Image (cartoon, grey):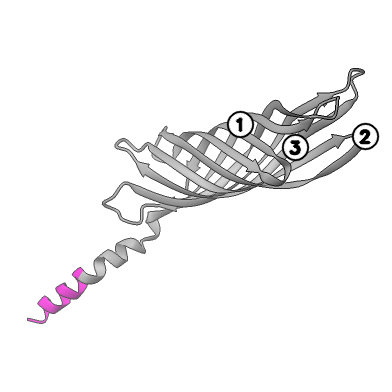
Amino acid sequence: MRTLPALAVAAMIAPGVALADPAAFRPYAEGLVGGLSIQRDAQTPLGTDADRGGSGFLGGARVGGGGRPMPTSGLWIGAEIEGWAADGRSNSRLPGGACADCLRIDGALGAFGRVGWQLPGGGMMHGRVGWQGLATDRTQGGRNDSGWQGALALGAGAEIPLSQRAYVRLDGTWSRAGSADLETWQGTAAVGWRF
């Protein structure tokens, strides 16, 4: 007769055990490459404001972790940090070639929350939101200013499994640094490994 209450207690705590299962959380690491598109307000050679575009390449790494809080659902929740180096440039030049308003993005560090939905076969679609610090170097009117620009960042992407642990990931991320009137679009392809 004592086995019935014991089974009832086990049935009540089993969902909690499943939620706390360390296997539900899996860390991952990725190497990434991609392209960078820049849009910003800049000074023309005549001193008026104009939209200026630019582009460049980027490469870096991303680490994070996540899992399914409800094993019977496809919902996946995680967090990640990333860093990349870039050669993104957006230039406005004077007739002689001197820089009227030139901006270079040398790289970024970012932290993101990530929510996804796992698909049959092991793939996943996801969205992410976070913050990026963009390392910039700007020359304007003969004055050079370098530093970090904080930017809100939003993105979406997909994972395609290669094996039980390896996968390919494609992402598109938009960021805006309001203080610098600076927008970027980042397209990346990554190869990742779940531990």
> Type of residue at label 2?
Gly
- Mark 3 and mark 1 lie on one chain; the one further toward the N terminus is 1
Q: Nearer the viewer, mark 3 or mark 2?
A: 2
User: How far separated are the C-alphas under marks 1 and 2?
Assistant: 33 Å
Q: Nearer the viewer, mark 3 or mark 1?
A: 3
Residue ID at (57%, 37%): 174
**Element type where label 1 sits in the image:** strand
**Element type where label 3 sits in the image:** strand
Give percent across and percent down for residue 46: 86, 25
Residue ID at (67%, 28%): 57
Give percent across and percent down for residue 149: 72, 46
In the picture provided, is 30 more to the left or to the right than 60? left
Numbered badge on residue 106 = 3
Q: Are marks 3 and 1 in contact (CB under 8 Å)?
A: no
| Closest to the observer, 48 or 43 | 48
Give percent across and percent down for residue 100: 86, 28
- Mark 3 and mark 2 lie on one chain; the one further toward the N terminus is 3
> Type of residue at label 1?
Val
**Element type where label 2 sits in the image:** loop
Q: Quadrant for residue 176, please give it.
A: top right
Is 91 located above or below residue 175 in the figure?
Answer: above
Residue ID at (65%, 29%): 37
> Type of residue at label 3?
Asp
- Furthest-bottom residue in view? 2
In the picture provided, is 160 more to the left or to the right than 190? left
The residue segment tinted magenta is 1-11
Q: Residues within 10 Å of mark 3 (few under 14, many from 20)?
A: some
Write down the residue under mark 1.
33
